[in-house]
Image (cartoon, rainbow, N blue to C red):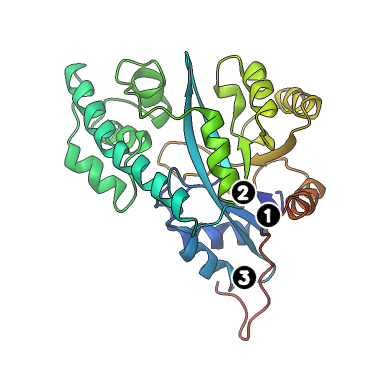
Amino acid sequence: MSRGDFHTHSTRSDGTLAPAELVRLAWRNGVRVLALTDHDTLEGIAEAREAAADLPGMRLVPGVELSCDLPGTELHILGLFVDPEHAAFTAELARFREGRVERGRAIVGALERLGAPIDWRRVQEIAGDASIGRPHIAQALLERGHVASIREAFDRFLAHGGPAYVGRDKLEPEQALEMIAEAGGVSVFAHPSFSRDYPAIAGRLAAAGLFGMEVYYKDYAPEVVEELRALALSLDLFPLGGSDYHALAGEGGREPGDIPLPDDVVEQLLDEVRRRGCRVPEPALPRAGGPPP
């Protein structure tokens, strides 16, 4: 287990644990620096911070995950150490979330035409208070028996270029980097191997001000980790890691902290972002009565 995890999701987007539950699970797993990086929202940060304040040594890093497009591929950018109260940033995120509802309806329509109908109301129930995303639709497909796993739902229908894939409002990655910087954060190229021609993309974004790259991703094989680490270092990008934890049924993912991110890299990150002027959360202090179970 690593002391740091910089890519997790809660019920505020497409995870299944509430922010507080996620923070407590991570702490029990030995994580002491946790980023909550829900898609297009910072609405879970306040609850996560409150939970972290009860857990000795825990730091909660405000984060977000943004989906970007380039010709022929999709990529995701994590914004870490952002200001959750930054008005322009939060307004833009709200606009993205509104677009997710329209996109979700269009995907459900496409699935019906493909002979895999699901109930839009059930998708809304699965999403709850979160903004609707493809994992919620994948869960509905799984429940209806159209697929045997969440992964199959993406492979058969929902992945970029798939028969039920519907694009979003276009966000250029350079725009994402600029938005994150204006909100006081640093940007990280998430799960780069998911994007076509990712070495060229990493080079392009490094030139545009990208801070880091997700090297120690949940199920990357050791040789992939080493390849990505070498690429990151060659581009002067900080090598980070995350579990991308969702706790979705049938996902088979890693729990928070179950990644090979070295502890010394976590400490180096805190020093580096502090040097760059980011607000680094202080570790929570022990409280009378001890932490909750």
Residue in the image at 74% along x and 33% along y: 237
Query: Disc 1 or 3, which lies upstream in sequence?
Result: 3
Q: Is residue 240 above or below residue 284?
A: above
Dot 1 falls on a residue whose secondary structure is loop
Mark 1 or 3: the one toward you: 1
Label 1 sits on residue: 278
Label 3 sits on residue: 55
Mark 2 or 3: the one toward you: 2
Residue 3 placement (x, y as % from top left): 71, 53
Residue in the image at 71% along x and 49% along y: 2
User: In this view of the protein, can residue 226 be seen by the observer?
Assistant: yes
Dot 2 falls on a residue whose secondary structure is loop
Q: How crowded is mark 3: few (under 14 residues within 10 Å), some or many (20 or more)?
A: many
State yes or no: discs 1 and 2 in contact (Cβ < 8 Å).
Answer: yes
Q: In this view, does 285 lie above or below 183?
A: below
Does residue 218 appear to the left or right of 162 in the view shown? right
Residue in the image at 42% along x and 42% along y: 248
Dot 3 falls on a residue whose secondary structure is loop
Query: Disc 2 or 3, which lies upstream in sequence?
Result: 3
Label 2 sits on residue: 185
Which amino acid does the dot numbered 2 rest on?
Answer: Gly
Work out how far the residue at label 1 is from the one at label 3, CA to CA, in angstroms: 23 Å
Q: Which residue lies furthest to the bottom in this view?
A: 288
Does residue 71 appear to the left or right of 7 in the view shown? left
Between 165 and 261, the one lying in front of the other is 165
Residue 231 placement (x, y as % from top left): 75, 23
Residue 129 placement (x, y as % from top left): 31, 53
Work out how far the residue at label 2 is from the one at label 3, CA to CA, in angstroms: 24 Å
Q: How crowded is mark 1: few (under 14 residues within 10 Å), some or many (20 or more)?
A: many
Residue 155 placement (x, y as % from top left): 41, 20
Which amino acid does the dot numbered 3 rest on?
Answer: Leu
Does residue 137 appear to the left or right of 24 in the view shown? left
